[in-house]
Image (cartoon, rainbow, N blue to C red):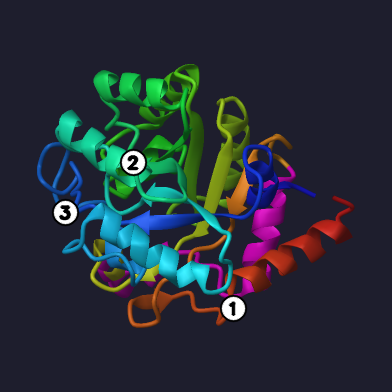
């Protein structure tokens, strides 16, 4: 089979652990002109920001609201503060540290997960996180999205794959757990192109991997491209088709890499395509059945 997030968390914690997303009001260097303008062509941050994340509220307030949401069902739950929205290492280091430390002071928060770009990890912040990891759980999740430079250029990512590989290695060497996000099905990538990226990831010291199907989201540059040239896109029109792709990818990965998820679920109001009408847990079961048929 494969190593799940639950398996990974059991190695580090006793009892149930849940990530709580935080929107701390960050922006992105690919939006404000530092790296580029307009952001990545696929990105609309509203598509993955939970309802309990409001930038008008403090980190503490957002975490307390998130705890209320989950504690109704799991009163003994503990939590990882997940700085998810935009680039959560982009800002003055002193300000970033104050936000992380605020999160860790909230009751039942047992660690941090920090989502960011590979070109936004300054040495001073990495040094702080390395020291922090000696006293609590710390993971940095890097949005790699593709291992192919031509794709990264096409989607206006603003960095190349060597930048991502270097950030992953440095973060691992600093004693910090490393996660990676990868989008499957970006325009211009063939099945062989996608499969080739598994071996590139195998050569990096990453702990967790999130796979996402390409989604066309309203309000993005990619939505405009899709409307004008749909023939440039090979979207997986059925969940079964995408599940086969995921299984092909999984069997090429190192077995010690934790697979945290396979799909993303954008709000119906923002999603253009593909729309499978399937919950995440249903897709996971579909993948497990297909892997079982493959004897994995």
Mark 3 and mark 2 residues within 8 Å of each other at the beta carbon: no
Q: CA distance from mark 3 to mark 1?
A: 31 Å
Figure label count: 3
**Residue 133 occupies quadrant:** top left
Q: CA distance from mark 3 to mark 2?
A: 17 Å
Residue 206 position in % (x across, y down): 55, 31
Q: Return the disc, 3 or 2, that comes first in the chain's sequence.
A: 3
Which mark is in front, 2 or 1? Answer: 2
Which of 225/24 is in front?
24
Q: Which residue is mark 3?
A: 38
Q: Residue lying at the far left in this picture: please name it.
A: 33
Secondary element type, mark 3:
loop
Q: Which residue is mark 2?
A: 116
Q: CA distance from mark 2 to mark 1?
A: 28 Å
Tell me the residue at 63%/48% (across/down).
Answer: 259
Instruction: Inspect the magenta stretch and tell me whether residue 285 lies in it.
Output: no
Secondary element type, mark 1:
loop
**Residue 131 occupies quadrant:** top left
Q: Main secondary structure of the magenta part?
A: helix
**Is residue 49 something one can see in this rendering?**
no
Q: Return the disc, 3 or 1, that comes first in the chain's sequence.
A: 3
Task: Decide if residue 288 is on the left or right side of residue 70.
Answer: right
Q: Which residue is mark 1?
A: 278
Q: Which residues are magenta?
A: 224-251
């Amino acid at each position: 089979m494969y190593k799940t997030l639950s398996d990974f968390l059991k190695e580090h914690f006793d009892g149930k652990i849940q990530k709580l997303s935080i929107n701390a009001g960050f922006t992105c260097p690919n939006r404000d002109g530092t790296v580029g303008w307009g952001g990545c062509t696929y990105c609309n941050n509203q598509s993955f920001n939970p309802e309990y994340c409001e930038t008008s509220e403090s980190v503490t307030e957002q975490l307390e609201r998130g705890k209320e949401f989950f504690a109704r069902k799991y009163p003994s739950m503990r939590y990882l503060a997940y700085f998810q929205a935009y680039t959560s290492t982009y800002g003055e280091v002193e300000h970033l540290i104050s936000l992380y430390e605020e999160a860790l002071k909230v009751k039942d928060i047992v660690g941090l997960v920090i989502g960011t770009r590979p070109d936004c990890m300054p040495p001073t912040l990495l040094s702080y996180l390395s020291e922090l990891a000696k006293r609590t759980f710390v993971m940095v999740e890097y949005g790699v999205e593709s291992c192919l430079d031509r794709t990264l250029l096409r989607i206006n990512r603003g960095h190349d794959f060597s930048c991502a590989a270097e950030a992953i290695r440095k973060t691992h060497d600093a004693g910090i757990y490393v996660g990676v996000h990868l989008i499957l099905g970006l325009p211009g990538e063939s099945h062989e192109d996608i499969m080739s990226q598994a071996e590139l990831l195998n050569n990096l010291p990453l702990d967790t991997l999130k796979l996402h199907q390409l989604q066309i989201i309203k309000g993005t540059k990619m939505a405009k491209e899709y409307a004008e040239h749909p023939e440039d896109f090979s979207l997986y029109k059925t969940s079964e088709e995408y599940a086969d792709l995921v299984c092909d990818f999984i069997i090429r990965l190192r077995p010690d890499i934790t697979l945290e998820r396979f799909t993303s679920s954008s709000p119906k109001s923002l999603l253009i395509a593909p729309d499978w009408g399937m919950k995440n847990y249903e897709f996971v079961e579909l993948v497990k059945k297909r892997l079982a048929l493959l004897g994995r």
